[in-house]
Image: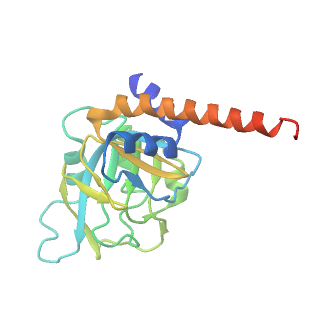
Amino acid sequence: MQHNALAARARRLGCATLVDAVGRVHGHRAHIPAMSSPDPLRSLFGPAATISYVPYREDLAGAGRDFKHYFYGALGQGPAADQVLVLSSGGHPDVSHGGGTKLARAHSAGLAGILADGRLRDFDQLRAYSFATWCTGEAVRWGGDTVMPHAYGVAVEVGGVCVSPGDYVHMDSAGGVVIPSASLHRVLDIAEDIAAEEAEAARIISAESQLPDG
């Protein structure tokens, strides 16, 4: 229930307001440029579980560690529900990092969503799942010969932003923001203040426009 309330609050505030709020608390970059989604009206929110991708190397691949190994390793021992699986690009943001079949595990586990700094396949299939999906675009070709998962539960880079496991990620059609977990509630409170400030400024501007000339 708490997750749903936090997600609804973040969705109501929107990405831009949350980015401004993080900027008042932290001095590092926290905004992710706009991405693509099979369902752009579905926002994403939740704590990050990370998988780091690297360029494919034949001598390191095939060691009995497939995507399933990294998927469940990233989610850890706690409840998987409401987490956001974050996939780094491995230096290839235009290559597929997965598709509808591979990511069916996220649907079964009840994840809040997928954030991939690479392309994903099967948008029609992903759109039907229970989680939100955001990535760099849709792909048609398998990318397993170009990138491969290498580590889980580590800090990764997405869109020029550092995402550490447990950070809260919000994505909507405007873009994304990464909020350190320790400052989540402070950021949300500041975002509420910013929203109120902007509403008051808009009210004043509207009143000015209605004043008689002279």
Task: Point out the image quarter for the N terminus.
Answer: top left
Q: Is residue 78 above or below residue 153?
A: above
Residue, x 19% and y 48% (percent of image)? 153
| Residue 111 visible (yes or no) | no
Q: Position of residue 162 (x, y in %)?
A: 28, 54
Residue, x 57% and y 51% (percent of image)? 40
Direction from residue 13 to residue 120 in the image, left or right? left
Q: Position of residue 177 (x, y in %)?
A: 41, 47
Task: Point out the image quarter for the C terminus.
Answer: top right
Q: Position of residue 9 (x, y in %)?
A: 49, 30
| Residue 20 visible (yes or no) | yes
Direction from residue 197 to residue 4 in the image, left or right? left
Residue, x 37% and y 69% (percent of image)? 93
Q: Position of residue 175 (x, y in %)?
A: 49, 53
Residue, x 71% and y 38% (percent of image)? 205
What colour scheme was applied to this rendering of the protein?
A: rainbow
Residue 83, by quadrant, is top left
Q: How many marks?
A: 0
* Farthest residue, direction top: 1
* Farthest residue, direction front: 214
